[in-house]
Amino acid sequence: MTSSTRTDAATRDSGAAVQRSFGSRLRDMSVPLTVLGAAVLAIALVYAVGGRDPGLVTQSVVTGLLLGGVYALVSIGLTLIFGVLGIVNFAQGSMLTLSMFIVYSLTTSAGLPVYVATLVAIPLMFGFGVLVQSLLLNKLTMTGNQEGPLLVTLGMSLLIINVLLMIYGGRPLRVPSSVSGSVTVFGAIASYERLIAFGGALLVAVLLTLVLRRTSFGLSIRAVSSNTQGAALVGVNVRRVYALTFGIGAACVAVAGGLLSPILSLTPSVGEQFTILAFVIVVLGGLGSVTGATVGGLVIGLVQTVGTLYLPGTGSLVLVFSVFVLVLFFRPQGIFGASQ
Amino acid sequence: MTDTAARPLHPHVAADDPRLRDRSALRSYAVLAGLTLLLAVVPLLLDDQSETIAVRTLIFAIMAVGWNLMSGYGGMFSFGHAAFFGIGAYADAYLLVEHQISPWIAMVVAAVLSAAVGMLIAWLCLRYKLAGAYFALATFAFAQMFLLVVQNLDFLRRTEGFNVPILPENSMWMLQFEQGSDLYIWIPAIILILALAGVIAFVNSRSGQYVQASRDDETAAASLGINVLRVRLIAVGMSCALTSVAGVFYTQYYFFVGPEQAFGSAVSIQAIIPAVIGGIGTIWGPLIGAVVVGPLSELIANLLRDPPPFLEFMQGVTGLDVAVYATLLIAIVLFMPKGIYGTLRDRWRR
Amino acid sequence: MSLLQVTGLTKNFAGLTAVDDVDVTVEDHEFLGIIGPNGAGKTTLFSLLAGQLAPTRGAVVFEGTDITGWSADRVARAGLVRTFQLMRPFESMSVLENVAIASHSHTRSRREARRHALAVIERVQLEQYVNAPCGTLPTAGLKRLELARALALEPRLILLDEVLAGLVPAERAPMIDLLRDLHADGLSVMFVEHIMAAVLALSERLLVMHEGAELALGEPRAVVADPAVVEAYLGEDYA
């Protein structure tokens, strides 16, 4: 792994203070701006010559953005874990599923409303993440082992899915929703649940960025991500930072899971599609970049929903993967990743 | 390149110098010969039910040996080997069902196709030196992609999959025999033996040494004149080709293949777990791991069908077998990273 | 025709000029020493010559062929080989197998490669570790292994990057003797080193680098007496 790829993105993204000229800043933004332009252009084209009812297109755009927000949230956790720990967490999707099942248990057995259950799930999943990193992964991460953590997270993913399968069985479950109704945005319907999910995602993204840039803990995370040895030398408890970072990644996923639970039908493998989407998003956005994960999430959400207009069902996912292949071909470091 | 006319830089060493003696290749071939005998005899000793476990184990073993070539020896971890297994399974199904082409030919087609696809994916990932975690991710994504593509293509029967038509009589050319035939064990056994022979030859060849050196330290390898990208692509090609052959046989044995059976993530995991448990980057590790994992699934299924009194609450529960593999995988990575065979081998050496 | 001709070689890293317009020629059979403070660009220079890095400007001509921008493996196969400051053995292999990797550049045969490797190992006096895993080697052994691997490629020109670093004084003398011997047998060397005694003992010419640029180039005694060199690097003791 080129560690420069992950540290550059993470360092730059976390706002390392470097005086740069406006010109060089603009050049840095050239790729993201191009992508933004391309997205706007693509949507305009769909409206103009796409051959689909404009109302439907608007609906897709709105749903896509709302969905994209939640994708972003799942991906932020993944990219943070990768940026700081260098671990590709193959269990991200299953951790999402786990969060959803926690919320399900809390709503059905304890009768808590969904969003309150989500709040309870957050510290639970945070603790889970901290435990996983401390007990299973820290030894491997500290020695810089590349393959070990990959295999462990893969194993964890299988373990979570199958334990859930053993406990709850395979039939789809529903989490009771707390709010109903919707709002009309530009002629498109946006259910309150989806709006709340989107809002929650953005809130977490903003909070996380603030924590990274403004708090001393955030500073220690950035330090570890950019130069682990240096950080240790100045007294940062690297193992603790690792554990807490994984915990934060898990907490992000807990929020996403809770917010998604009223919307999706719940089975032990429901999170798996998110694993792969989160990966595509993180690669698209740039491994280690929180901004990239957010932007990437919105882009992929749009690609998926607008794509469904033309390729119904799972077909739109083929479009998503085409994006992935294109990124690999032309810009493997992603939108916000450092240039090779 | 060398100015050989001038003073020689190095002392002369006799070809039979005892320090040069390396019997490891010979030993490996000897073990392989023993294994061949064993596998020749095994089908005659097993009952029908055990035969299905044996076949499953052999298929796992071939997949794991294939995976190990690029991931263990090459150091490029593939988390999407289902892509190549699936290419094999579907190539066979499609060619057989739509065009009545022999599975043996399908094996060749699948091998070539998988090698090409695998090398392309590897090249895309490796040319910017984004290896390691990134590579695993990319292979994982490609496997999922293939799954989706197949589910959406009419000529590949979308989600329905292919049913292999049952022939009225045994046919070696069409690789179909009566149920319980010993040939269903001998054929994958021969494939496995040939694969292992290939691995032994490769590991002891210059390319094999180059690939391992590249895995250990890419920069140092390049500084010693090794074209790292090329040797890696060779390992990848062989790895994917072998795995796809396992896929071809799978379709022939189970008479049915659908998108999940061919390209599902469970398949990728089946290629990885035996190799990790047995010992990554060793000749015998994948086989040993397959022998552990193959029957384990069956054992657990039996246990759940008819549990002893204190485990009665487990009856009929699904997912325990995979949960057990997963735990085993994590435990091995944490406590015995060289795998069962790898760890034992290191102890013997001391 | 010179063995190596470097003209105007420059390397910029986003605002930092690591190597600044360096011109140097190395003749066949020569032993060129390179000294300078840390950060002077010596290792970067080696990386540019050996292909680990591509230059921003300038040219490298080796045995009459322009090898500028060639990849590391291609340069090595052409006969220009370097060692690394931080030792990089192939961990999974024994000493013999490590060197055999390099010997394989001339032969596909395992047997031949191993035989050649053993000969090289004897030349650098590492034979007591022949079949040992590299993990058991002490620093001095690892340095010799690095050297053995480079020599096994039968290079025309070898770039030695601080091959004495990490050796205690008692270990240095045998290494210096070995290098002198190899040079006497026809090896051409560019030699980056901080240990002045070794540099002066072995070099026929001396290049001094400072902040990426050439500060001085010439006969060792003269260079060492140069006031600019004294100020930049040596200090009064060597004047």
Image: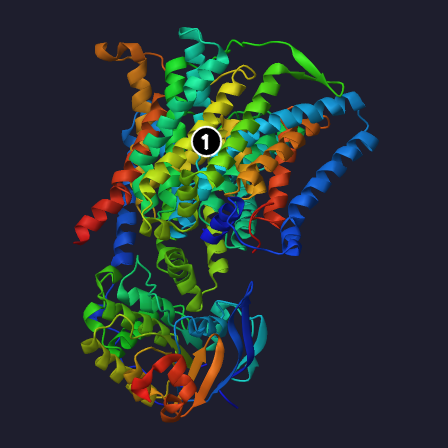
Q: Position of residue A229 (x, y in %)?
A: 35, 52
Chain of the residue under label 1: A
Q: How many marks?
A: 1
Q: Name the colouring of the figure.
A: rainbow
In the displayed structure, C167 sits above or below A198; it is: below
- Decide which of A230, C75 is in the foreground and name it: A230
Q: Secondary structure at mark 1?
A: helix
Q: Position of residue A40 (x, y in %)?
A: 74, 36
Residue at the spot 51% in from the left edge and 24% down from the top edge: A256
- Decide which of C64, B65 is in the foreground and name it: C64
In the displayed structure, C134 sits above or below C180; it is: above
Q: Judge whether residue C80 can be spotted in this image.
A: yes
Q: Judge whether residue B174 can be spotted in this image.
A: no
Left or right: where does residue A34 sit relative to residue C133?
right
In the displayed structure, C205 sits above or below A139; it is: below
- Crowdedness near tag 1: few (<14), some (14–19) or many (≥20) residues, C-alpha within 10 Å: many
Residue at the spot 47% in from the left edge and 27% down from the top edge: A253
Residue C220 in which image quadrant: bottom left
Left or right: where does residue B305 sit relative to residue A157?
left
Type of amino acid under label 1: Gln
Left or right: where does residue B332 sit relative to residue C49?
left
Residue corresponding to mark 1: A92
- Decide which of B49, C100 is in the foreground and name it: C100
Q: Position of residue B248 (x, y in %)?
A: 50, 37
Q: Position of residue C82 (x, y in %)?
A: 41, 73
Image quarter of the C terminus of chain C: bottom left
Residue B183 in which image quadrant: top left
- Decide which of A146, B275 is in the foreground and name it: A146
Residue at the spot 27% in from the left edge and 68% down from the top edge: C142
